[in-house]
Image: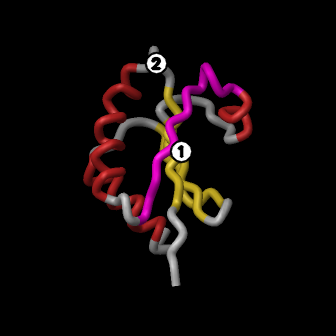
Amino acid sequence: MSQQHATLLQFFANWCYPCKVLTPIVNTVETNMSDQLRVSRIDIDQEEDLASRFHIMAVPTLVLIQDNQEIWRHTGVLSEHDLKTALGSALSGKL
């Protein structure tokens, strides 16, 4: 039985300092959780329609999608530990 990867949407903007702080954290988590997760980076200035569809009001915002359903969302910066913990909980259905 194969497990489908979840997708973490990372909404950001090039002018956003907190986005620049969050990016290396997301990169590390992506590497550590590559068996469960893939990351899609979305520049809200280039992908306005997609940002609107996901109701992005501030950046950075992370949205976790599994089976075409949003299962977790966070706006703002968080630590690598907190991000791994939150994603692990969301992916295991404990949220």
Q: Residues within 10 Å of mark 2 (few under 14, many from 20)?
A: few
Is-magenta flag for residue 40?
Answer: yes
Gap in angstroms between the C-alphas marked 1 and 2: 16 Å
Report which quarter residue 70 is drawn in: bottom right
Instruction: Tell me residue 62's x, y (percent).
Output: 50, 43
Q: Looking at the image, is 44 positioned above or below residue 27?
A: above
Residue 79 left/right relative to 73: left
Sequence-wise, the earlier of marks 1 and 2 is 1
Which residue does the numbered mark 1 point to in the structure image?
Answer: 9
Which residue does the numbered mark 2 point to in the structure image?
Answer: 14
Q: Looking at the image, is 33 positioned above or below residue 74?
A: below
For the point 33% across and 42% down, the residue is 27
Q: Which residues are magenta?
A: 36-48
For the point 62% across and 22% down, the residue is 46
Report which quarter residue 25 is drawn in: top left
Instruction: Tell me residue 49's x, y (percent).
Output: 73, 30
Q: Secondary structure at mark 1?
A: strand
Display coloring: secondary structure
Q: Residue furthest top?
A: 15
For the point 53% across and 54% down, the residue is 7
Q: Of the residues shown, which amino acid type is indicated by label 1?
A: Leu
Q: Looking at the image, is 61 positioned above or below residue 92?
A: above
Residue 29 left/right relative to 58: left
Q: Looking at the image, is 29 positioned above or below residue 3?
A: above
Instruction: Tell me residue 11's x, y (percent).
Output: 53, 34
Mark 1 and mark 2 in contact? Answer it, CB < 8 Å.
no
Q: Secondary structure at mark 2?
A: loop
Q: Of the residues shown, which amino acid type is indicated by label 2?
A: Asn
Q: Residues within 10 Å of mark 1 (few under 14, many from 20)?
A: some
Is-magenta flag for residue 87?
Answer: no
Residue 2 left/right relative to 18: right
Which numbered tag is attached to residue 40? none
